[in-house]
């Protein structure tokens, strides 16, 4: 009986090992498929609907005013307590990958990924410009992911640190905290090794449209965390101009963005408007009133179905619905395309 029980245990253990091996193989296959889709998307011809209007029909000196529902105070996207000011993070920063709003697929942003094996990822880094004129290098990617996990060396003390007490990383699950390796063999190559295959790694850890932003190591270490929380600096389409708590956020176009102004609309590029202002309006009715009065161009937070309904058939406005994982967003704009 004892021998039979041991045989059953061995069979169960072998079955579990086989299941784990099958799961890892499936994860590795999915990883490769995602990376191939991203690589194929680089340089693809865009569908006609996604192209911008001719630039000679666009007022390139215009200001766009967006109503935002809240202001969490600071502007350091890696810091708990500041991470919710999405208008700032999306304007100022870029991420390794971007997301196609048509189907949520991933495509190259600051980096183009390639799986070398099921746990080893190599990413080619583009020489994007930071807002201070310096050039992005792979070391900035390594630093940013270490910083997101509280692993950056200057966070551990030393002459370059003003790391304030209570600074807690906002998104450690997106960071290099559990990676085996996070290295920059040279300025244009970023190398990552994972403890096991992870089919969702690129979409979770590299998505620049969500909770991942890339910071300059030299700027962050030079100015310190407190300064960065007040005046962010990245490679995004807008550079930071000013912020008044609970009132506004102000940004201006960054003309040296790595994608030119005539790049397809679905991809982050030099903006078609010179100035971006975010007005803090906590009350939805105040945001809607500002939209109807022409004081606000876009509202995009906390707009439920009932609030959006009156504008759906109104020729003076455009309503966009974007589905997502467990959430949805209604964006309402004045109809800018009336003939």
Image: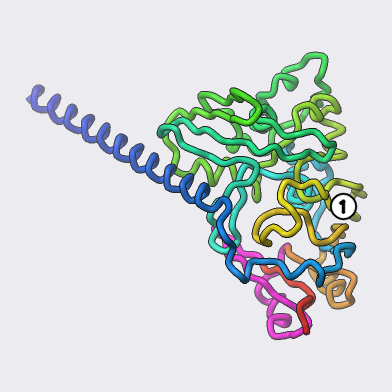
Residue at 86% over, 28% down: 223
Residue at 73% over, 59% down: 262
What residue span does the magenta drawing correspond to? 301-329
Circle 1 residue: 252
Q: Nearer the viewer, residue 183 or 314?
A: 183
Question: x, y percentage for residue 274?
Answer: 87, 58
The furthest residue to the top? 158
Q: Which quadrant would the C terminus be assigned to in this image? A: bottom right
Residue 38 is at least partly visible in this image: yes
Splitting the image into 4 quarters, where does residue 45 fall? Answer: bottom right
| Image: 137 above or below 322 | above
| Image: 91 above or below 110 | below
Answer with left or right where residue 303 lies relative to residue 22.
right
Residue 304: within the magenta?
A: yes
Residue 5: within the magenta?
A: no
Question: x, y percentage for residue 109?
Answer: 63, 46
Q: Which quadrant would the N terminus be assigned to in this image? A: top left
Residue 76 is at least partly visible in this image: no
Residue at 58% over, 53% down: 43
Q: Nearer the viewer, residue 35 or 10?
A: 35
Question: x, y percentage for residue 96?
Answer: 62, 42
Q: How is the image coloured?
A: rainbow
Mark 1 packing: few (<14 Cα in 10 Å), some, or many (20+)?
many
Splitting the image into 4 quarters, where does residue 32 fall? Answer: top left
The number of numbered discs placed on residues in the rendered structure image is: 1
Q: Secondary structure at mark 1?
A: strand
Q: Nearer the viewer, residue 286 or 116?
A: 116
Question: x, y percentage for residue 144?
Answer: 68, 32
Residue at 17% over, 31% down: 11
């Amino acid at each position: 009986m004892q021998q039979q029980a041991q045989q059953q245990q061995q069979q169960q253990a072998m079955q579990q090992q086989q299941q784990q091996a099958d799961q890892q193989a499936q994860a590795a296959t999915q990883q490769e498929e995602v990376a191939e889709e991203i690589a194929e998307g680089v340089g693809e011809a865009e569908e006609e609907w996604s192209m911008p209007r001719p630039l000679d029909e666009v007022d390139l000196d215009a200001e766009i005013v967006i109503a935002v529902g809240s202001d969490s105070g600071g502007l350091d996207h890696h810091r708990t307590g500041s991470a919710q000011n999405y208008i700032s993070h999306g304007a100022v920063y870029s991420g390794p990958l971007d997301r196609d709003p048509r189907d949520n697929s991933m495509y190259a942003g600051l980096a183009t990924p390639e799986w070398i094996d099921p746990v080893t990822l190599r990413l080619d880094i583009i020489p994007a410009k930071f807002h201070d004129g310096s050039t992005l290098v792979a070391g900035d990617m390594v630093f940013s992911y270490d910083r997101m996990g509280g692993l950056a060396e200057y966070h551990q003390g030393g002459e370059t640190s003003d790391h304030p007490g209570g600074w807690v990383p906002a998104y450690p699950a997106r960071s290099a905290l559990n990676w085996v390796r996070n290295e920059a063999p040279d300025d244009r190559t970023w190398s990552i090794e994972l403890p096991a295959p992870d089919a969702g790694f690129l979409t979770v850890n590299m998505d620049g449209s969500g909770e991942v932003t890339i910071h300059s190591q030299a700027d962050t270490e030079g100015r310190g965390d407190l300064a960065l929380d007040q005046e962010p600096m990245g490679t995004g389409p807008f550079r930071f101009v000013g912020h008044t708590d609970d009132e506004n956020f102000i940004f201006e176009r960054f003309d040296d963005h790595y994608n030119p102004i005539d790049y397809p609309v679905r991809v982050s590029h030099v903006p078609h408007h010179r100035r971006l202002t975010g007005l803090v309006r906590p009350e939805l009715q105040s945001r809607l009133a500002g939209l109807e009065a022409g004081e606000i161009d876009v509202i995009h937070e906390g707009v439920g179905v009932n609030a959006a309904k009156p504008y759906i058939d109104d020729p003076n406005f455009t309503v966009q619905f974007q589905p997502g994982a467990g959430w949805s967003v209604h964006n309402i704009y004045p109809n800018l395309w009336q003939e």
